[in-house]
Image (cartoon, helix red, strand yellow):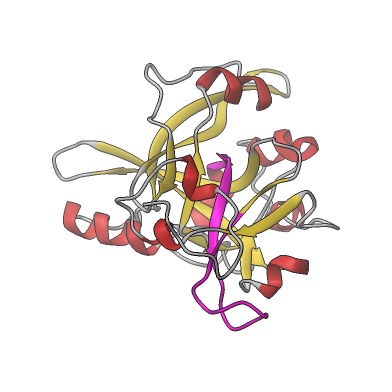
Amino acid sequence: MCGRYAQSAQIRDLMEQFEVTGVTPREALPQNWNIAPTNEIYIIRSSGFNGGDAFSRDLTTLSWGLIAPWLKEMSEARISQSRAINARSESIHEKPTFRDAFRRTRCLIPAEGYYEWATALGAYSPKQPFFITSDNSRQLSIAGIWSAWQSPEGNIIESASVITREAVGELATIHSRMPVMMPRERWDAWLNPSERDIPTLQNLMQLDQPAAHLVAHPVSGAVNSVSNNGKDLTRAITLGEPETLF
């Protein structure tokens, strides 16, 4: 987890839910129910202090998969992205690819829901896809990190990674990992650019109920192909029924 997710919200809806008061994209990203690594995604991040302890939130777009800061070539950067879409919460503060971004440039990654493929952990057939979303129709607020990398030509490429943790509850019967959810009351602390204390940041990722409001249902294997898209990918199916979506 997490290798694909869905996002079809309008910019104004993301601004409202995440209380964005800073800059926003000039153009909306296309609705995408099958977001894959290196695709452009939305994130919410701090735009810096406006005085005192207050800072505004920006909604911006960048590519999914963090580029290791020491890389020199574009070809290496793209390979790095595909391998660094997720950062483990248990070791993020130690891994060279992620540790500086964890301390300095954290973000929220909004998602309509994400896909997970069953392993041998529960009663489901391995590789059966599931869609995990909120039971209250709200955007998921996933903890993330972002960074900026400069190409040899001087181009700045911003990229981000999802932070994951050990799965719990029903989700643990599907897959061993799940995203770290960041509740609203912790957004300010998580996005605060001056907060760099590792134990404090680790504590922000610890929740009494990490899977609260998350529900999962099986979906068609059509999601396996990145060429397939559309809201039907998120539709619940009965396991064993014929797949006739595409």
Q: In screen coordinates, is 233 left or right of 17?
A: left
Please give the count of numbered marks on the rendered protein: 0
Q: Position of residue 2 (x, y in %)?
A: 52, 59
Q: Which residue does the image show at 60% across and 22% down from the upper left?
A: 13
The residue segment tinted magenta is 105-131
Q: In screen coordinates, is 70 left or right of 24?
A: left
With respect to residue 157, does 75 lie above or below?
below
Closer to the camera in the image, 136 or 44: 136
Q: Which residue does the image show at 30% across and 40% down from the upper left?
A: 157
Q: In screen coordinates, is 119 left or right of 211?
A: left
> Is residue 5 located in the magenta-colored stretch of the structure?
no
Question: Is residue 89 visible from the viewing direction of this image?
Answer: no
Q: Position of residue 216 (x, y in %)?
A: 67, 57
> Is residue 123 located in the magenta-colored stretch of the structure?
yes
Closer to the camera in the image, 128 or 138: 128
Q: Which residue does the image show at 56% across and 73% down from the upper left?
A: 118
Question: Is residue 127 visible from the viewing direction of this image?
Answer: yes
Q: Residue 237's image quarter?
A: bottom right
With respect to residue 193, does 74 lie above or below?
below
Q: Position of residue 77 (x, y in %)?
A: 26, 55
Return the residue found at the far right.
208
Return the residue found at the far bottom.
120
Q: Position of residue 105 (x, y in %)?
A: 53, 42
Q: Which residue does the image show at 46% across and 59% down from the upper left?
A: 3
Q: In screen coordinates, is 187 left or right of 226?
A: right
